[in-house]
Amino acid sequence: MNPLLKNFRAEFAERTLRLVWRQWNALGVSGTESAWKGAVIDPDALLVFSLHIARYDARLFQEILDWLRLNGALINIQRLNNMLRKYGFSGSRIIPAVAAFLAEADSSQQLKWKRLAESIDSQKDEPLFFLSNGNPAPLPSERDALFARYNFSAPPVSLRGYSRSFDPALPENRLLTYRSFFGVNSRSELVCLLGARHGVTAARAARLTGYSARSIQNVLTEMSASGWVESRKEKRDKTYSLRRSPHLTGLFAAEISESAWVLWPVVFQALESIWQKLFSGELDDLDGLALDSEIFLLWKTCVDILSLDEQKTLPLPAPRKTLHHAAEMFPSELLNAMRQLECE
């Protein structure tokens, strides 16, 4: 393998796993990384993204299961399914097995996860975990029976029980705080969004929260009747905002500015597209212009995906018009953007 590509893959994987660990730590997972500080965490997007890359970090995978066993009731299944359909996360392959695990581990969550657990992929058996170099982890002598039903070879799951409930005092956990109070429904996302933005249309709110435009329009209309949400006509659309009030501001306004709510599914989709390419083996034997060409196309794909995120959460610049030296320039630009994402 090209040494440049090998180093890039290792550093990218380390940075991506660190980002995921930090967000899970803020939610209550036991880990050594510092808790995430920044935009509100989207637990549904984080879950569907994490379930694939955590197959390269068995400890992270098991800690996520541990957290879900305690806090899984706060995951929005409808929204999670919407993300899987819209963004095509690879985590869809493992979600049925995880859903079955949760349904069996906690009877109170059985109805919530049962339907997701019904889908069993017809693919052949495959290892659940991979090594850091992308090779499959050695097959265990004893397989976990539940994951085996879903065609995954994994050692028996043994959870440590160190996860805790999320800390509602952390601004980054604001969405989970609202779900605990308002319920696991679109109102929680909308209150979170309205607290972070000066005004949004129903169409924009739907895109940012992951629901249909019609359902968001109906909910915003209902919320406006409270007098707490105001609307004003702008051209052909109505813009909705939280009424200016010391009481409402204290309850719902985010402490961390307009960037408090970002489109995490788009950011994670871009990162997953890179992860998939680097660990697919497709680039391993390429060198010179052929590698530049593939990296250039990957770079353009990521920029196109990220263009949907108005906040530019992952500030990746567009590639130059020439594909020469793309394999050298893209890692530098991407890792720099990831450092900015984590405010380093």
Image (spheres, rainbow, N blue to C red):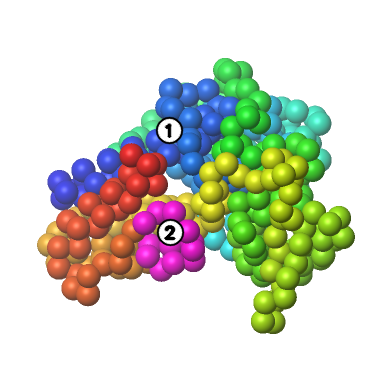
Question: What residue is at 63 percent from the left and 29 percent from the top?
Answer: 169
Relative image position of residue 109 (x, y in whole percent) = 77, 35
Q: Is residue 48 left or right of residue 184?
A: left
- Earlier residue among tags 1 and 2: 1
Instruction: Name the amino acid, label 1.
Output: Asp
Q: Which residue was labeled with disc 1? A: 57
Relative image position of residue 45 (x, y in whole percent) = 57, 49
Q: Residue furthest bottom?
A: 236
Q: Is residue 313 left or right of residue 123?
A: left
Res. 251 image quadrant: top right
In the rendered image, is residue 153 in sight? no
Is residue 156 shown above or below 324? above
Is residue 314 shown above or below 97? below
Relative image position of residue 72 (x, y in whole percent) = 69, 35
Quarter of the C terminus within the rendering = top left
Q: From the viewer's side, name the closer residue of 226 and 191.
A: 226
Q: From the viewer's side, name the closer residue of 224 and 150.
A: 224
Asked if residue 75 lies in the magenta stretch, the reply is no
Q: Is residue 50 left or right of residue 67?
A: left
User: Mark 1 or mark 2: which is in front?
Assistant: 2
Q: Which residue was labeled with disc 2? A: 312
Relative image position of residue 249 (x, y in whole percent) = 69, 45
Q: Main secondary structure of the magenta part?
A: loop
Alpha-carbon span between mark 1 and mark 2: 28 Å
Q: Which residues are magenta?
A: 302-315
Q: How many marks?
A: 2
Question: What residue is at 27 percent from the left and 41 percent from the top?
Answer: 11
Q: Secondary structure at mark 1?
A: loop
Q: From the viewer's side, name the closer residue of 308 and 249.
A: 249
Q: Secondary structure at mark 2?
A: loop
| Residue neighbourhood size for the residue with mark 1, other residues' Cα within 10 Å, grouped as few (<14), some (14–19), many (≥20) | some
